[in-house]
Image (cartoon, coloured by chain):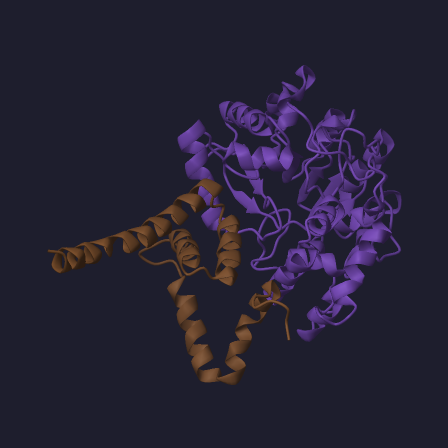
Amino acid sequence: MSKTYYDPADLRKFGKISEWNQELGDKFFDYYGKVFEEGALTAREKSLIALAVAHTEQCPYCIDAYTKDGLQRGITKEEMMEALHVGAAIKSGATLVHGVQMMNKVNKLEM
Amino acid sequence: MGKLKTQSLQKRDSDLAKSNKQLDILSNGIFANGELPTFKNKISETNQFPLKAKKLEILQINVGYMCNQVCEHCHVDAGPDRKEIMTRETMQQILDVIKTTGAHTLDLTGGAPEMNPHFRWFVEEASKVGVKDFIVRSNLTIIRANKKYYDLPDFFKKHNIHVVSSMPHWTRGKTDKQRGEGVFDMSIKALQELNERGYGMPGSDLKLDLVYNPNGAYLPGDQATMEKDFKKALMEDFGINFHSLFAITNLPIARFLDYLIASENYEDYMYALVEAYNPAAVENVMCTNTLSVSWDGYLFDCDFNQMLELPVNSKSRHISEYQEELLEGRNIVISQHCYGCTAGAGSSCQGVVA
């Protein structure tokens, strides 16, 4: 058994998920590839979105992958960090907006 | 220019300054235990072994390893302390070859080729012979390094030199990190001077191309997209024009290999190269149409093999005994560093190949 839950080398084996279900694996990777193609958004913009989501999802494999992808595309550290703050702002906003629910409940319960 | 980035491996007396040590690393570990296929096995899968030289198109001359910069990724291990410099006698032998060769491109590299004391004489003489495409790989900062080089843009223009220059990024931080403090500002100034002479301007015959290679343990992005990004940024920020951008993969030899090992990126990088292997790139890999001549006149399949001291597999091994017909069809000497030229869209001194 591995000593940690996450092994960076496992990212290289991602494609192997198809071995246990070829059809669904193939469909997933076809879809994945298509999503990241240049479209109404540039591949560069998609890479930055992926990087931000990788962090909000706290997926270490995705963080490794899209940090490297960003460097390959010439994306700067400043751009990467700004993208992360967008993710962080939505995360914190999503937490705080629930405060309205808390406030509603307090107002309902208190005399 | 500010402080140099580092010292050459040779100056540091590093083990990796020795080519056999580099070849050992490239042949052992993940390639010996079967984790990754050797380059020979990989190209054999698509019946591309042995890789054979086709008709010669490009004669690439390394006129010496001396350089005013000490870039962290340099595959030549060049620097101010390197004393290997091509003599006028060897240059004369090359001029004799240029008169008869079928190659259409002459490509001068180094080090900083301009630092060879016979550089200008050689360019003048080679120009007289009439080369179709005469490239000088200029690191840009040399143009601003010392007064004696200030007239280089005019000299290049006079001889219709095709200038190919390194530029790792359009931002100061990334450029200086790879190439040394102050390199970005000097490079920008040099590019502006070249533009003033007509170099790199839209529609101009004075060709100015830039070379991009990644600033670390990752592969270059799409060449066309990078070119668009470079053009936009350099124009908006500095009003600079250039013609094409060549995206070149860093090969795992010399100082880049040293960096990969020291930063514990070697295995991941080799995996990335092997995973990105593209058989279509093998078809047009530059060693099949290029010949590299070292500062002391020996012949190699490419500049990388020159640094690894892997001589050409032919009876014609030195410029003094050059026989083009013996070199055509020769088997190319390969090792695992060759994965660097076959990853993704491929990589050559002229950028992508597939």
Query: Considering depth in this image, is B20 or A56 the residue closer to the camera?
Result: A56
Judged from this view, the residue extending furthest toward the top is B147
Image coordinates of residue B290 in percent, x first then y, are 71, 51
Q: Residue at x 12, y 59 (%)?
A: A108
Q: Is residue B311 visible?
A: no
Image coordinates of residue B223 in percent, x first then y, are 51, 50
Query: Against B216, is B285 above or below?
Result: below
Q: Is residue B350 left or right of residue A27?
A: right
Residue B326 falls in image quadrant: bottom right
Q: Is residue B346 left or right of residue B64?
A: left
Number of disc labels? 0
Image coordinates of residue A3 in percent, x first then y, are 64, 68
Query: Considering depth in this image, is A5 or B276 the residue closer to the camera?
Result: A5
Image coordinates of residue A25 in percent, x first then y, are 46, 78
Judged from this view, the residue extending furthest toward the left is A111
Q: Colour of chain A?
A: brown
Query: Considering depth in this image, is B16 or A6 the residue closer to the camera?
Result: A6
Q: Residue at x 42, y 68 (%)?
A: A32
Query: Considering depth in this image, is A42 or B314 the residue closer to the camera?
Result: A42
Q: Which quarter shows the C terminus of chain B? A: bottom right
Q: Colour of chain B?
A: purple
Q: Residue at x 17, y 56 (%)?
A: A106
Residue A49 falls in image quadrant: bottom left
Query: Against B207, is B263 above or below?
Result: below
Q: Is residue A14 visible?
A: yes
Q: Which quarter shows the N terminus of chain B? A: top right
